Amino acid sequence: MHTEEEKKFVYEMDAILKNRGDFSQKLDWNEGPTYVYYGKESELKSKGPYQFLMVSWKTKLLLFLRIRNAAKCMAYLM
């Protein structure tokens, strides 16, 4: 089970992403439910590259951020 803090985070993150205009889709993996967020509705419909992914993996909350052009992020990360 997830903690109350994790559940609160998931609901708040979902609201933030939807309020900024992202499109979401719920997927069911063998290990747990997954929420995928896309920047465009066309990407959602074609199951194109996602921007964010939240997954319940064997009762652990995992967060994924897809970086399309890592070279542009290197200065920030360093």
Image (spheres, rainbow, N blue to C red):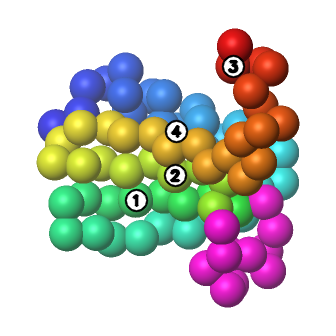
| Mark pair 3, 1: CA separation | 27 Å
Using a 10 Å C-alpha cutoff, classify the residue at mark 2 as few (fewer than 14 neighbours), some (14 to 19) or many (20 or more).
some
> Image quarter for residue 65?
top right
Q: Earlier in the sequence, mark 4 or mark 3?
A: 4
Give the vertical position of 76 relative to 69 (above or below). above
Q: Position of residue 42 (x, y in %)?
A: 79, 80
- Within 10 angstroms of label 3, few (less than 14), some, or many (20 or more) residues? few
Residue holding disc 2: 53
Q: Is residue 61 magenta?
A: no
Q: Place residue 1 in its image quadrant.
A: top left
Residue 77's tag is: 3
Q: Amino acid at mark 4?
A: Tyr
73 vs 51: above or below: above
Q: Which residue is mark 4?
A: 11
Pointers 2 and 1 in contact (C-beta within 8 Å): yes
- What residue is drawn where x is 74% and y is 75%? 43
Kind of element beneath mark 3:
helix
Discs 3/2, front: 3
Tell me: 11 left or right of 77. left
- Report the Cα–Cα distance between label 2 and label 1: 7 Å
Q: Earlier in the sequence, mark 2 or mark 1?
A: 1
User: Are the residues tagged 4 and 2 within 8 Å (C-beta)?
Assistant: no
Q: Which residue is mark 1?
A: 34
Instruction: Report the span colored magenta.
Output: 39-49
**Mark 4 neighbour density, 10 Å: few (under 14) some (14–19) many (20 or more):** few
Q: Is residue 10 above or below residue 58?
A: above
